[in-house]
Image (cartoon, rainbow, N blue to C red):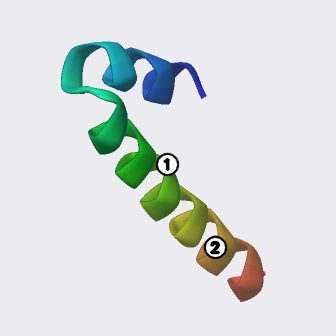
Amino acid sequence: MEVFLQSAIYCGIPAALDAMRVAKEVFAEIESEK
């Protein structure tokens, strides 16, 4: 989560929100493979 907070500061809120959305999809895919 810290990475996303830092990216919000350096890249801007819209980019950080996109990154969080993609990360959620990736983590959900990883969980579904278990």
Cβ–Cβ under 8 Å for marks 2 and 1: no
Crowding at mark 2 (Cα within 10 Å: few <14, some 14-19, many 20+): few
Task: Return the residue found at the far front.
Answer: 14
Q: Which mark is residue 30?
A: 2
- The answer to whether 25 appears left or right of 16 in the picture is right
Question: Given this view, does label 2 or label 1 mark the residue nearer the observer?
Answer: 1
Vertical arrangement, residue 17 with respect to residue 32, above or below: above
| Residue at 37% across, 23% down | 8
Residue 21: x %, y % from top left: 50, 59
Give the quadrant of residue 3: top left
Residue 9: x %, y % from top left: 33, 13
Sequence-earlier tag: 2 or 1: 1
Give me the C-alpha separation between circle 2 and circle 1: 15 Å
Residue type at mark 1 is Met
| Residue at 55% across, 19% down | 2
| Residue at 28% across, 42% down | 15
Q: Which residue is mark 1?
A: 20
Vertical arrangement, residue 17 with respect to residue 29, above or below: above
Q: Secondary structure at mark 1?
A: helix
Q: Quadrant of the C terminus?
A: bottom right
Q: Nearer the viewer, residue 4 or 27?
A: 4
Task: Return the residue found at the far bottom.
Answer: 33
Q: Which mark is residue 8?
A: none
- The answer to whether 33 appears left or right of 25 in the picture is right
Residue type at mark 2 is Ile
Q: Secondary structure at mark 2?
A: helix
Give the quadrant of residue 16: top left
Vertical arrangement, residue 18 with respect to residue 31, above or below: above
